[in-house]
Image (cartoon, rainbow, N blue to C red):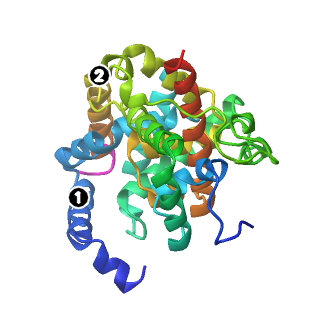
Amino acid sequence: MTPELILASAGLADRLAEERALVRLLRAGDPRAFESLVAAHHTALTAVALTYVRRRDVAEEVVQETWIGVLRAIERFEGRSSLKTWIFRILVNTAMARGKREARSVPFSSLDHDEDHEPAVEPERFRPPGDLYPGHWQSAPSDWSAQPEDVLRGRETLAVVRHAIDALPDLQRRVITMRDIVGFSADDVCAALTLSPNHQRVLLHRARSRVRAALEVHLDD
Amino acid sequence: MTDLRADMTCHEVVELVSDYLEGALAPDTAARFERHLRTCDGCTRYLDQMRTTIATVGRLREDAVPPEALDRLVAKFEDWRRSSGHA
């Protein structure tokens, strides 16, 4: 990290000091330190585990195994990455091992890469070449701010979103889960999934575009 | 590649929306993107739909750790504490 970046991320020094203190307490066997870590990361770990193994009970086992792995390895944590990144790396490794054992997930397939090139919106929605305004909307998106609030926030709409995310290719599902459900930064996702920043953005774009398209079908009906 | 002087089409805009929201567009591309939005209701609505999509996905977040899971983990923690020689 450049000095400019360090200066730009205000509070980073505080966060690092806080993290070192937490690690010390954990090594000393302080249960409150462990509980605060669990409170901070457990539901996020579960959401990410569910992008590797589909069954909730299996995902919960993976997360429990992750926490045990964290405790076993905390003595060796060197602070080269943030504690959060380190914990999620343990989760990803645990989940991948488990996923392979269950042979349910297609291993990081070429499929994901092929789908990186899928258009965000069907080409037929735009005016064709040779038209007076080629590449402009033929059938423009509707105004969702005109939608009643209780429809947008309703259970049905949430189910549509959940379903659309579940149908995404593995990597896209992982990235949108970490970014938009769990609230990770792009850097956190790149570190946890060992993705380049560019690939992370492409995956996020494809995932969000597909979820938007599913919402459009649902809301414009 | 697209001509930098040319106006952006809606078809191009929808592929750049995420990079725009991520702040990942080069300054000149971001300027062309915003210039397009100022005169295009369709793309303004598309960007708004994308923001609504992101907010809606965010509502799938669960915050509370289930109490049974927490109890199980605290028990595991105690096992670890004893076996690793803590008091």
Q: Which secondary structure lies at badge 2?
A: helix
Query: Is the magenta region chiefly helix, strand or loop?
Result: loop
Q: Which mark is residue A22?
A: 1
Badge 2 and badge 1 both on one subunit: no
* Residue receiving disc 2: B68
Instruction: State the image coordinates of residue A153 (x, y, percent, origin top left).
Output: 34, 22
> Is A173 positioned to the left or the right of A183 in the image?
right
Is any atom of residue A191 visible in this view?
A: no
Residue at (21% x, 49% y) in the render:
A33
What residue appears at the point 49 percent right and 20 percent down from the top-left corner?
A: A219
Q: Magenta residues, as a range?
A: B82-86
Image spot of residue B63 (x, y percent): 29, 33
Q: Chain of mark 2?
A: B
Camera-side residue of A101 and A216: A216
Position of the N terminus of chain A, as image quadrant, is bottom left
Q: Amino acid at mark 1?
A: Leu
Q: Vertically, is A163 above or below A124?
A: above
